[in-house]
Image (spheres, rainbow, N blue to C red):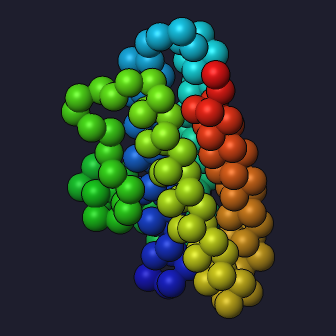
Amino acid sequence: MTQVVKYLKTVQANTYTLYLKTQNFHWHVTGEQFFSVHKLLEAQYQDLGAAIDDIAERIVMLGDKALGTFEELLTYKTIAEAPEKIPATKAMLTNLMDDHYKVIECLKECTRIAQDHDDIVTDNLMADRLAFHEKAAWMLRATTHAK
């Protein structure tokens, strides 16, 4: 397994974990901001779902096997799953925002490795994912600080 593939697998595992956590929080959000937060999280988990496929396909294109089991995801992920007890809405959003920042750091490392290996396609994929995660973190941060 190449270094690029190893980091792509971490990106895939983190994306899948964040997808599931975002969808879980989407189902359980409550409170004054219910509708807007519910819609925001839906848009975010839909993007994450599409990204899982793009990342997995890139791993396969590079000649390796994409992660396809929960056991494999657990091996590679670096972010925590959602807590069993669903937090209040503001805590949900803060938790997701923190995870987006963790994924951003993972994506930046994958970008560095892709560039070191002259892998322009992976580099471009990581740039696209960085743009999404930076915007998602910003939206979550703005929502948690809204009055």
Residue beneath the point at 61% across and 83% down? 113
Q: Position of residue 66 (x, y in %)?
A: 45, 60
Looking at the figure, which quarter contains the C terminus? Answer: top right
- Compared across the picture, whether 64 is left or right of 84 comes to right
Judge whether 5 appears above or below 100 on screen. below
Looking at the figure, which quarter contains the N terminus? Answer: bottom left
- Compared across the picture, whether 109 is left or right of 77 comes to right
- Compared across the picture, whether 29 is left or right of 147 comes to left
Q: Position of residue 19 (x, y in %)?
A: 48, 39
Residue beneath the point at 50% across and 84% down? 2
Residue beneath the point at 39% across and 18% down? 28
Judge whether 106 appears above or below 128 on screen. below
Residue beneath the point at 60% across and 61% down? 104
Judge whether 33 appears above or below 44 on screen. above
**Total number of numbered discs in the rendering:** 0
Q: Position of residue 122 (x, y in %)?
A: 68, 70
The residue closer to the viewer here, 145 or 69, is 145
